[in-house]
Image: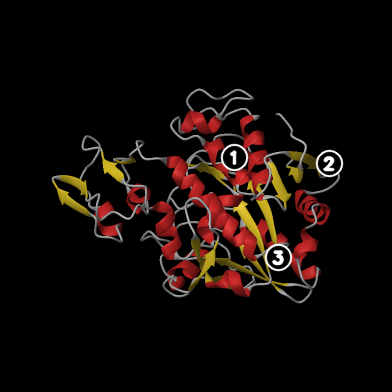
Amino acid sequence: MKERKGSKVYFASLKVKDTGFLEKLDNLFEGSGLSMVLGENKLVGLKLHFGEKGNTSYIRPLFIKRVVHFIEKGGANPFLFDTTTLYSGSRANAVDHIRTAIDNGFGIGCPIIIGDGLFGDRKQEVKINLKQFKQASIAQIVFSVGSIVAVSHFKCHLLAGFGGAIKNIAMGCASKQGKLMMHSTVSPYVDEEECVACELCMLYCPADAIAIDEKAVVDQKQCIGCGSCIAMCNTGAIKIQWDINLCIFQERLAEYCYAVAQLKKGKLFYINFLLNITPDCDCFGKSDTPIVPDIGVLASQDPVGIDQASCDLINNSIGNEGSRLRKAFGKGTDKFRDLFPKVNWEYGLAYAEQIGLGSRAYTLEEIT
C-alpha cells in the first residue's frame, strides 16, 4: 500500500492482543481527536445508514452503541439520524424509516431522528458556486445540530465504485430534491432476456416510469434515476446505461459533501467501518458475499483522506474466493475496477481534493 504524507487517518485493525476490539474502538476515538469536534452538552448527530429492509451487512448496532457511549462520556448529547430515500423502499418516509432502523437493531436507547422531515421536504438551500451546482438542497437537521459524526459502512457502489464518508454525507444529508439532482444523469434499461415481467420494478418505481409490455419498459423521460428498480429486481435484468457520464455523478457527490462541510466547519468527523465490505450498497434489500476479509475501522477529520485510505487498504487485501470478484484477488489489485470496470472511482476523490474538500495524501497512524 502506498502511504501518502498529508492529513492524518487513524486505524484500528481487528487484530487484538491484550485489548478487546470494543476497547480498541475507544482508543481510536480518543486518539483520533473525536472529542475535539464535540461541544459539551451540545447535540451531536451520528449520520448512519440503517440498512434497507432485508439487508444484513450494515454496521452492527453494537459498534454504534460504543460510539454513542464515547460521546456521552464527553458530556455531549448524541442521537442517530438519516434522511428519507428517493426510491420507494422501506425508508421512503420517516415513519417507515424509523421502523426499519428499529427492526434492524438500532433501538439501542439513543433517539432516532429522520433529518428531512416526515416526507423528505424539510430542507434549506446552501450556496456553494461550484461546477455542477451553484447551491445545494440540504436536510434541515444539518443546520440545527451542533456537530455531525459520519459513521459509514465502507462498501462498493455501482455508480461511484465505492461508498464511504463522502457519499454518506453527500447523499445522506441531502433532501429528496438534492438526491434527485445528484441522480438526474442516471437512467437504467431492461435486459429483455433476463426480465421475467414480475412487476416488482413497476410497483416500487416512485415516478411511475416503468410499464410491463410482456417485458418491463423504462420511460427514459419520466425516470428520475433513483435506482429503486435496480435494487428491487431479483433477476438483475435492470441495468445501468454505462454510456452516461458517471464522473458527473461523482462530482455531484463531492459538491454536496462540500456543502455540508462548509456548514459544519470544525464540527464534522468521519468514521469508516471496513467490515462486511460488500459489492453493493446497503440500499439493496439483500447482501452479497464480502469481497475481502474484514479489515478494521478508520477515523479522521478529512473525508477525502479517510476514503482514499479505505480504498488503499481494501486493494491491498487478498480478495475472497467465491465473492463477485473476477480477477483481482491478489494484494495490490484494484478490486473496485474489477467489479465495475467502467467506473473510474479515483476520479471522485481527485475532484473532491480539487474543490478543497480534503486531501488524498494521508498518513496512516495505527491505534493499538
The residue identified by callout 2 is: 17
Tell me, for residue 264, which label it has, or none: none
Tell me, for residue 350, which label it has, or none: 1
Residue 250 seen by the camera: yes
Measured as percent of width and height from the top left, residue 198 is found at 22, 49
Residue at x-position 73% and y-position 42%: 14
The residue identified by callout 3 is: 68
Q: Is residue 338 left or right of residue 228?
A: right
Type of the residue with mark 2:
Lys
Measured as percent of width and height from the top left, residue 151 is found at 64, 56
Nearest the eye: 174 or 239: 174
Of pointers 3 and 1, the one earlier in the residue sequence: 3
Structural distance between the alpha carbons of marks 2 and 3: 25 Å
Mark 3 neighbour class, 10 Å CA radius: few under 14, some 14 to 19, many 20 or more: many
Of pointers 2 and 3, the one earlier in the residue sequence: 2
Q: Are marks 2 and 3 in contact (CB under 8 Å)?
A: no
Residue at x-position 29% and y-position 57%: 205
Please identify, in this view, whether the residue under mark 3 or under mark 1 is nearer the observer. Answer: 1
Residue 260 drawn above or below residue 113? above
Measured as percent of width and height from the top left, residue 117 is found at 48, 74
Asked which secondary structure carries label 1, the reply is helix
Mark 1 neighbour class, 10 Å CA radius: few under 14, some 14 to 19, many 20 or more: some
Please identify, in this view, whether the residue under mark 1 or under mark 2 is nearer the observer. Answer: 1
Type of the residue with mark 1:
Ala
Of pointers 1 and 2, the one earlier in the residue sequence: 2
Nearest the eye: 262 or 108: 262
Asked which secondary structure carries label 2, the reply is loop
